Image (spheres, rainbow, N blue to C red):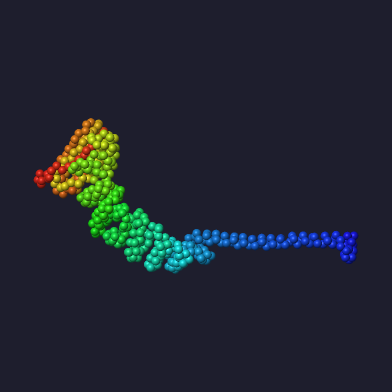
Amino acid sequence: MIQQEFQRNKGSGEESAWDTSFPQKPLRIVEIALRPAWRSWILILAVLAGIAYLGGEVLRTAYISILAGSEEASTLERAVKLEPSDPELHHRLGMVLFDSPVDADRIEGLKQLRRATELNPYASRYWADLAWVCELAGDTPCATQGIDRAVKLNPMTPQLRWVAANTFLRAGQNDAAMAQFRRLLEMDPAYAPATFHVCLGSLGNPQLILEKVMPPAKDPSLKLTYLNILSRSEMDGADDLARQVWAKTVAEGTAFPLSAATPYVEHLLQFGQVQEAENAWRDLEKLGVIANPGKDQDGNLIFNGDFDHVPLNTGFDWRSASATYLALDFADPTPYSGKACLRIDFTVSRNEAYQPLYQIVPVAPNQSYVLTAYVRSKDITSDSGPRLQVVDPVHSNGPSAMTESTVGTTPWHLIKLEFCTGPNANFLQVSILRVRGRTYPTEITGSFWLDNVALKPSGTGVEGTCHPSRP
């Protein structure tokens, strides 16, 4: 029925509800729904394609990174083929190839390192490694040019300056090497010992090093480092230059730690240059590096004889030696005079020989001297107690004398020793000594105090009348 009605209306040309609603509205709905769907699919496909591409790049990059971490040349070569514009890959491949014993590999390694600097000419590390490899390959111009470029790109790295200086030195470019060493010491004085040793061994000219390598700074630490190295050198003229460096350092008037000068003073004493050592010691006093507690005691040759300061254990101050079962107190508050004194406690009953403290004292030959000190004791059990000894440790014809020992319990009292130096004497050793006991009771315990130690000339020695004291 519906179809017949439709045909009848259509053939008559009359309008009806079927003409306006049925065939038109569904067509519009389909048109509106289909067009956005196609666009969405196209967009989705495009996004999926982008994701696939990016995912592939990520995987590719990750794969190259894995290859780049290898130490195998063949693996690194695959990485270079995949990413030929990466300078780091060329650099790594070059370093690995040059480590090969095969000449062809080493030649190719050098090419790869050059390629890394071409791709990135601003990486100082690439130039430094290229310089090192070129030097190993015997290409000196490449080595010096490479390290020069590396330093210019990274001028504030001391390690690079050190490498550059040594590269120039091995290439025979001494002026360039000394300029690099000089700048290195300005940047980092910790390189001073190594720098001076290398320069002395390579250049063989201590004066040139002082002029061209030593920075023109007022800080005395570098000069003292050089001084201590010179003093141990066997090179001709090293001792004379060391004295010049010392004089120049002292003349600048800048104080410095005692530890910086100790090696020089000890070297002078070790080789018997006592007068020079004494002069250096006086220079240290003038600079305020050390203080002489006994400087007001006219004519007293003993340094710190009142123990008003803890001994420095070097130079011309008291030196302590390790001793078992002894306790030393350099600041005992019960002195004979002054602020403090030395106290020695024999803590365990034993019959041992002890020499816990000594001092090196400059003296004149064939001269009469008198050694004095104040001592006291408490409960010293042995028949052989502490005493003072004077000996010439170098010359057998020098003095070797001891004071009487202190035993039992005694108040402060004066001990005294007169002696003469030998014809070759220039220094003596003054010691606190305890010799082994020979009669009962031999073992020693108790306490001993020492203060106001003094050594002074007692008159001019006359040959035939002033003879060294022997035990």
Q: Residue furthest left?
A: 464
Figure check: 218 above or below 307 = below
Percent position of residue 326, x then y = 28, 38
Figure check: 437 above or below 148 = above
Q: Give me the residue at 32% from left, 55% from top.
A: 217
**Quadrant in the picture for the C terminus:** top left
Residue 54 is at least partly visible in this image: yes
Percent position of residue 464, x then y = 9, 45
Image-based side of 144 in relation to 349, left or right:
right
Q: Nearer the viewer, residue 339 or 443?
A: 339
Residue 231 is at least partly visible in this image: no
Q: Quadrant of residue 61?
A: bottom right
Q: Which of 168 and 328 is in front in this view?
A: 168
Percent position of residue 249, x then y = 27, 53
Q: Give me the residue at 40% from left, 58% from top.
A: 156
Percent position of residue 336, x then y = 23, 35
Q: Give me the residue at 15% from left, 43% from top.
A: 457
Q: In which quarter of the image is residue 293?
A: top left
**Quadrant in the picture for the N terminus:** bottom right
Image-based side of 410 in relation to 78, left or right:
left
Q: Give me the residue at 47% from left, 62% from top.
A: 92
Figure check: 3 above or below 336 = below
Count of numbered badges drawn on the protein: 0
